[in-house]
């Protein structure tokens, strides 16, 4: 009797159920939050948050345009960290949008 690893069974189950893409996206958004906190100043990082990934574009929500300009030089590093560990890249572009101060999540 051959033993099958739990990790293999979990991957197979996620693929069959059709939620593997959503799980990968959630992991990538969590990684984006971590890399933003690590790369940017502690003053800027809380004002920028990953909103969603759609059509392989990572969308970052920012509270002010001056903070949005801080993301530009770090786009490549953000994408490399977010895509690390996936067989196919989850995101290949970064888009920054301005969010209204009233709709910010705290």
Image (tube, rainbow, N blue to C red):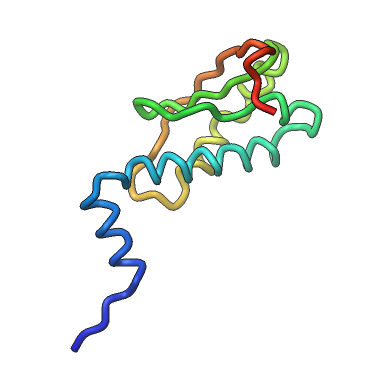
Left/right placement of residue 93 relative to residue 81 reads left
- Residue in the picture at 34% in, 71% down: 6
Left/right placement of residue 74 relative to residue 6 reads right
As displayed, is residue 51 above or below residue 80?
above
Q: Quadrant of residue 100?
A: top right
Q: Quadrant of residue 31?
A: top right
Q: Farthest residue in the left direction?
A: 1
- Residue in the picture at 55% in, 18% down: 96
Coordinates of residue 42 in the picture (x, y in percent): 79, 34
Coordinates of residue 65 in the picture (x, y in percent): 68, 11
Q: Quadrant of residue 2?
A: bottom left
Q: Nearer the viewer, residue 73 or 90?
A: 90
Left/right placement of residue 18 relative to residue 60 reads left
Q: How many marks?
A: 0
- Residue in the picture at 56% in, 30% down: 50
- Residue in the picture at 25% in, 45% down: 18
Q: Nearer the viewer, residue 78 or 47?
A: 47
Q: Farthest residue in the bottom direction?
A: 1
């Amino acid at each position: 009797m051959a033993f099958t690893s739990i990790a293999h069974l979990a991957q197979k189950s996620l693929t069959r159920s059709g939620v593997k893409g959503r799980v990968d996206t959630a992991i990538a958004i969590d990684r984006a939050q971590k890399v933003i906190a690590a790369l940017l100043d502690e003053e800027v990082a809380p004002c920028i948050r990953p909103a969603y990934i759609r059509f392989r574009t990572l969308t970052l929500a920012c509270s002010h345009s001056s903070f949005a300009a801080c993301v530009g030089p770090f786009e490549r590093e953000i994408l490399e960290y977010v895509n690390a560990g996936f067989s196919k890249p989850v995101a290949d572009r970064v888009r920054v949008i301005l969010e209204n101060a009233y709709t910010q999540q705290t």
